[in-house]
Amino acid sequence: MKFKIKELMEKFDFPIDAQNELLLSLDVFLQDNKFINIVKCYDNDNYDFNDMLSNTTALAENKGINIYTAHMLLLLCMTPMLYKKYKQKGIEDKIFYDTMRDLRYKLEECRLVHNVNGTFVAAWYKGIFGMKIFELGRLQFEINHTWFDCTVKGKYVPKGTKVLSVHIPRSEVRLSHDLVLDSYNKAVEFFKEEFRENIIFICSSWLLYPWNREVLKNGSNLAQFYDDFTIVSSGEYQNYSEVWRLFDCLYDGNPDNLPADTSLRRAYIERIKSNQPIGYGTGVIIK
């Protein structure tokens, strides 16, 4: 198992120091069979992902391993079994490796926000290991259903309509409009058996918070991404804890400690200083 995990981390371009620390923690886990037994649960069609996380958390606390590190190890050890499931479904290797590169995205996120080699959003992977979320080009997609009624460009979309949810992975690749449009086209092809009519894309994200469009420069990547959607609802967070998504760090209560190296970050800093809310939006595209 250790060799396979090392091979995967190299494949996903994990930094060397992260590889070394994760392998050391894996050695601790492999001293008994408890961790292996947790991993093997994924082979059972009736596995409970949340239970696997909980049991891994308890084991990590018992062995003195950071739970974020432990969760990343669990996901890495489950990955070879997920590959077999992709093969059984006839899904090409490129889609598998593109999708699972999300492990590195979450690793980098955890290193920046918590200075830990691991992941602090392990629950997100329930969809990926359930083979519901796939990365197709720059974006990730999963089948979902609308939880509201709306009308988009004259077309009524009733509650419960089957749609494709759009997720924006954190990656080193810029969110260029050409790549975004290419992803939508890839999604139409990949999910064509699931949709008899035009595909409806839906995205809920802090990027679609309406105030953002007031400060985004026309023609910028983020502005073009925003403008593709019809915003059908929005909301506000109760505090500023979600700003880590933009700043790659936790908010300590002092906006002057937030990095101000982009125009959007500077705009958010000024908004926080003036005690204005931040939030999220939900947008729809009918393709």
Image (spheres, rainbow, N blue to C red):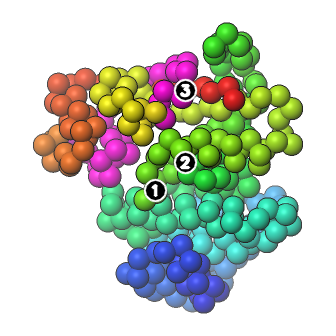
Quarter of the image for the C terminus: give it. Answer: top right
**Percent position (x, y) of residue 177?**
50, 41
Number of marks: 3
Nearer mark to the viewer, of 2 and 1: 2
Q: What is the crowding at mark 2: few (fewer than 14 residues within 10 Å), some, or many (at least 20)?
A: some
For mark 3, what is the residue?
229
Disc 2 from disc 1: Cα separation: 9 Å
Give the residues drawn in magenta, as a range.
225-253
Residue 82 or 184: which is nearer the viewer?
A: 184
Nearer mark to the viewer, of 2 and 3: 2
Mark 2 or mark 1: whose residue is earlier in sequence:
1
- Mark 3 residue element: loop
* Amino acid identity at mark 1: Val
* Amino acid identity at mark 2: Leu
Disc 2 from disc 3: Cα separation: 16 Å
- Mark 2 residue element: helix
Disc 1 from disc 3: Cα separation: 21 Å
Quadrant in which residue 96 is drawn: bottom right
**Considering only vertical position in the picture, is 170 above or below 29?**
above
68 with respect to 81 (left or right): left
For mark 1, what is the residue?
173
For mark 2, what is the residue?
179
**Percent position (x, y) of residue 219?**
39, 33
**Percent position (x, y) of residue 117?**
41, 70
